[in-house]
Image (cartoon, rainbow, N blue to C red):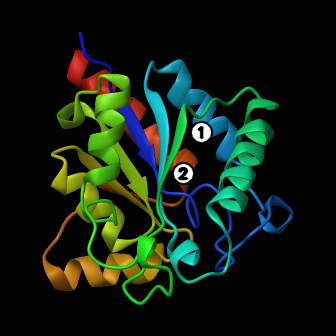
Amino acid sequence: MKKRAVFLDRDGTINVDVGYPRDFAQVTLFPWSAEAVRRINAAGFVAVVVTNQSGVGRGFYSEEELQTLHRRMGEALAARGARLEAFYYCPHYDYAADPRYRGGCACRKPAPGMAEQAARDFGLDLASSYMIGDKVEDVRLGLAFGGTPILVRTGFGEASAVRLEALGLRPAAIAANLLEAVAWLEERERSLRA
């Protein structure tokens, strides 16, 4: 039987969005993030971060610096009993000076490349998985892989809710923050089993 995932956006969803942090010292986790991830773990989902990181292509930080930041973020959450299985990121930027990061890609949200790679790596059933994030692109990603998208109002969430309505796109739910999104997910899962 295939596993199911909760895909999580990073900036504005798990932590305060400060732009382009190059070091974990610049990252502030939301106070509810560890509990939310613990509850995702307890519900039997694979918790995976999917994040657009054009800061690599823009030359603001290297992939090595980004990977170190992700390792430290994972360790900080693990110290509070919350397990993130993997971080997937899109480093591309259309105008990157480095040709490795220039041009079209299949991984930049809302394209489903990161979710599809995670599905291959972890044996995931994307159609029964969730996507939680604060941007229009996060909701579109959830729709693109056939899962259930949830918008959070933290980060860019308020503006995204307005844009989604104008575009005629509806997330399955809109939650105040990641913890409330997970509570909605838990309730939905209970009702599906009933």
Name the amino acid, label 2. Leu
Name the amino acid, label 1. Ala
Residue 170 in picture, x, y percent from top left: 20, 65
- Does residue 70 lie above or below 188 as drawn? below
Query: Which residue does the numbered mark 1 point to in the structure image?
Result: 36
Residue 36 in picture, x, y percent from top left: 59, 39
Instruction: Say whether residue 96 is left or right of residue 142.
Output: right
Query: Which residue does the numbered mark 2 point to in the structure image?
Result: 178
Write the residue at 51% across / 48% down: 180
Residue 188 in picture, x, y percent from top left: 30, 33
Instruction: Say whether residue 2 is left or right of residue 174.
Output: left
Q: CA distance from mark 1 to mark 2?
A: 6 Å
Choose between 13 and 87: the one closer to the eye: 87
Task: Find the residue positioned furthest to the top.
Answer: 1
Numbered badge on residue 9: none
Residue 104: image quadrant is bottom left
Write the residue at 66% across / 67% down: 62
